[in-house]
């Protein structure tokens, strides 16, 4: 007889080959959208208006924080290579990692205590407020860190970078909860195919 607590018996999400396939798909989709659907340069060679900045935290909420992280990291590399924004150590280390974390951490913080379905069934207004807070907060932390890296590796002025990356990313990131509300019911089947991690 199994005396295991039902809460403990709940299966932990597993990292699968299917996840890896979707990490690449989400990352390439993100990078292509950032490179070709956001063509307005703000700092030529370094920053452009990223109208689809919300896509990676949305992936984090819909498919799990790890999926969001890899979508952000791979998307940053793809975008940098396609758009001509690749700055060797900055893109591979600081930009890729901090952009990935800005996608993963809002979902991680909010979904560790209750599922997205539970959040949305309890109160959509509360979800919008809390999701926007965490998404924008981690977006701002990403901007501060990325600006420091650009100042060091590219010789750009720190506050100049903070201003322009802030303009490029904060408003689109603030759309995250609304896009999650729009897509969550429409992607139910895909969410069951892809193990959330």
Image: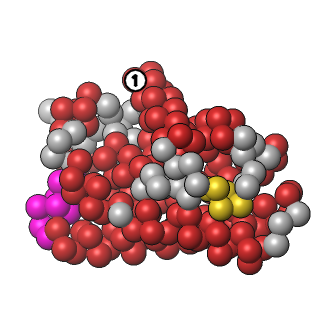
Provide residue 150's location: percent of width, then percent of height.
Answer: 78, 61
Residue positioned most to the front: 40
Provide residue 153's location: percent of width, then percent of height.
Answer: 86, 57
Q: Quadrant of the N terminus?
A: top left
Q: Quadrant of the C terminus?
A: top left
Q: Quadrant of residue 83?
A: top right
Provide residue 27's location: percent of width, then percent of height.
Answer: 51, 36
Q: Quadrant of residue 135?
A: bottom left
User: Most prominent secondary structure in the magenta stretch?
Assistant: helix
> What residue is shown at x 77% (from left), y 68% (from top)?
148
> What residue is shown at x 27% (from left), y 62% (from top)?
178
Magenta includes 177? no
Figure disc tally: 1
> What residue is shown at x 69% (from left), y 36% (from top)?
81
Q: Is residue 42 left or right of residue 1?
A: right
Q: Is residue 40 left or right of residue 182?
A: right
User: Is residue 39 something that shows in the picture?
Assistant: yes
Q: Is residue 6 left or right of residue 67?
A: left
Q: Is residue 133 left or right of residue 114?
A: right
What stretch of residues is rendered in magenta? 113-123
Check disc 1 and report its element: helix, strand or loop.
helix
Residue positioned most to the left: 121
Say few, some or many: other residues with alpha carbon within 10 Å of mark 1 (under 14 / 14 to 19 / 20 or more). Answer: few
Residue under pointer 1? 18
Q: Is residue 170 above or below residue 118?
A: below
Magenta includes 121? yes
User: Is residue 27 something that shows in the picture?
Assistant: no
The one nearer the camera, 89 or 86, is 86
Provide residue 192's location: percent of width, then percent of height.
Answer: 22, 33
The one nearer the camera, 53 or 62, is 53
Colour scheme in use: secondary structure
> What residue is shown at x 21% (from left), y 53% (from top)?
182
């Amino acid at each position: 007889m199994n005396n295991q607590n039902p809460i403990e018996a709940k299966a932990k999400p597993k990292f699968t080959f299917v996840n890896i396939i979707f990490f690449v798909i989400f990352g390439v989709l993100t990078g292509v959208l950032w490179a070709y659907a956001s063509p307005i340069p703000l700092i030529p060679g370094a920053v452009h208006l990223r109208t689809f900045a919300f896509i990676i935290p949305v992936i984090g909420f819909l498919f799990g924080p790890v999926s969001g992280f890899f979508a952000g990291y791979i998307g940053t590399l793809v975008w940098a290579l396609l758009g001509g924004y690749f700055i060797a150590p900055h893109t591979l280390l600081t930009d890729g990692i901090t952009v990935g974390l800005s996608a993963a951490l809002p979902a991680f913080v909010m979904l560790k205590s209750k599922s997205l379905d539970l959040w949305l069934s309890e109160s959509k207004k509360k979800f919008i407020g809390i999701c926007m807070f965490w998404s924008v907060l981690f977006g701002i932390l990403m901007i501060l860190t990325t600006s420091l890296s650009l100042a060091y590796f590219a010789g750009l002025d720190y506050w100049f970078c903070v201003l322009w990356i802030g303009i490029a990313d904060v408003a689109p990131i603030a759309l995250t909860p609304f896009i999650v509300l729009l897509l969550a019911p429409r992607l139910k089947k895909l969410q069951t195919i892809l193990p959330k991690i």
